[in-house]
Amino acid sequence: MALVAVDNLEVGMVLAADVLDRNGRMLLGAGAELNRKHLVIFRTWGIAEVQIVGDDSNEEPAGPLPAEIDPAAVEAAQERLLPLFACSGTEHPVMRELLLLAALRKVQHGLC
């Protein structure tokens, strides 16, 4: 199961969980295959992200690194930053993304 921003959804993806509006009303049930109309409805109702069927355990966060960034330097920066995430952990995709962004910033600004 992967949490995907509405702007990154594609027609044909399958919901892993019900999509509810702010008041708890169901907009679309788990197992539904998304079509263009669903994407419009999500945006209309202010849905920011939905859970999509798929194994996200081995996914890379966000996307590829910029070409000028050395992946080894980012990995080293992440290792140095890891103690700062000791209490919150990095199991959640948001925390993994925060760790990556912090490491990228360190590398880009020469703070390593």
Image (cartoon, grey):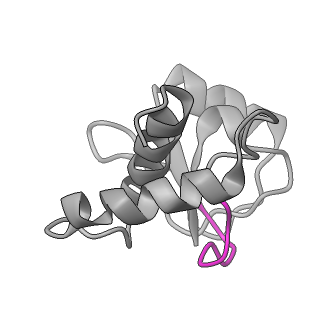
Q: Point out residue 47 in the picture as x, y percentages from the top left corner.
A: 47, 34
Q: Does residue 53 sit above or below 62 in this rendering?
A: below
Q: Is residue 57 magenta?
A: yes
Left or right for 30, reference 83: right
User: Residue at left 64%, top 46%?
Assistant: 62
Q: Point out residue 82 in the picture as x, y percentages from the top left corner.
A: 32, 64
Kindly tell me whether residue 48 is visible in this rendering.
no
Magenta span: 51-60
Left or right for 51, reference 36: left
Q: Point out residue 87 in the picture as x, y percentages from the top left corner.
A: 13, 68
Residue that lies at the very extreme toward the right in this rendered image: 12
Residue that lies at the very extreme toward the left in this rendered image: 87
Q: Is residue 89 magenta?
A: no
Name the one closer to the observer, 30 or 65. 65
Kindly tell me whether residue 82 is visible in this rendering.
yes
When asked about the image quadrant of residue 33, the answer is: bottom right
User: Residue at left 57%, top 52%?
Assistant: 74
Q: Point out residue 100 in the picture as x, y percentages from the top left corner.
A: 49, 50
